[in-house]
Image (spheres, rainbow, N blue to C red):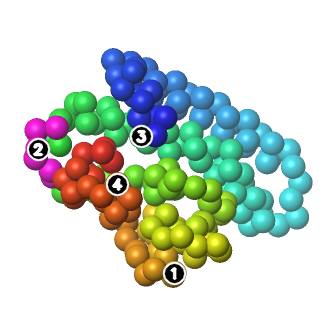
Amino acid sequence: MRVTKAIDIFHDNLDEIADALVTNLDMDLETLEKEYLEASMPEHWIAEEVKKLTIEERFGKRIRTLKHVQRAIHARDFPSVAQNHITDADIERAKEYPIEELYPGDLTRGTLKKGRCPFHSEKTASFFIKNNRYRCYGCGVYGDSIDFYQKLHNVTFKEAIRQLQ
């Protein structure tokens, strides 16, 4: 939640932060494009898959940070949640919040993230995150970001929506 604290501190400069993040990502993506154009890959589809994995590995956290800043800008400009009124758009934004940023432990990398369940004690990982949905095969819990936040912090639906903006 370090991003949330930074957003609180630099609330007046969110637009500039978002612009800087986009500019930085654009420059790094251009560099990555040049690297892949210079590399000789035998099959075009292999190069595309390697490129996708590299983008996720190098830029995934920065892209999630940018989305978080964009949500904060939206919350600042349209404070419907702060007025105790939750819209469908607020719920959708909350569902898009990455569960892996809420997860208190370590997860494996990749499209299927795996770790120990935060809701019961276990020795081996039975908790999985895929497509921003989670499931624990040990205790049976499953859901989206809102469900995860509610269960993890023992809060109401409205409070979870407010915190995930």
| Residue sitting at x 44%, y 27% | 6
Q: Amino acid at mark 4?
A: His
Report the mark closest to the observer, 4 or 2: 4
Residue to which mark 4 is pinned: 153
Q: CA distance from mark 1 to mark 2?
A: 36 Å
Q: Which tag, 4 or 1, sits closer to the chain's start?
A: 1
| Residue sitting at x 47%, y 75% | 135
Up-down relation of residue 143 to residue 61 (above or below): below
Q: Position of residue 143 (x, y in %)?
A: 37, 71
Q: Which mark is residue 114?
A: none
| Residue sitting at x 58%, y 44% | 61
Start-end of magenta stretch: 82-87
Instruction: Residue at the far top: name it.
Output: 12
Q: Are marks 1 and 2 in contact (CB under 8 Å)?
A: no
Report the mark closest to the observer, 1 or 3: 1
Residue to which mark 3 is pinned: 68
Main secondary-structure element of the magenta-colored stretch: loop
Q: Position of residue 29 (x, y in %)?
A: 66, 39
Q: Which tag, 1 or 2, sits closer to the chain's start?
A: 2
Residue to which mark 2 is pinned: 84
Q: Which tag, 4 or 2, sits closer to the chain's start?
A: 2
Q: CA distance from mark 3 to mark 4?
A: 20 Å
Q: Which mark is residue 138?
A: 1
Q: Which tag, 2 or 3, sits closer to the chain's start?
A: 3
- Can you say which quadrant of the picture contains the C terminus? top left
Q: CA distance from mark 4 to mark 2?
A: 19 Å
Dot 1 falls on a residue whose secondary structure is: loop
Dot 3 falls on a residue whose secondary structure is: helix
Q: Amino acid at mark 1?
A: Gly
Q: Amino acid at mark 3?
A: His
Q: Position of residue 32 (x, y in %)?
A: 73, 41
Viewer-proximal residue, 122 or 1? Answer: 122
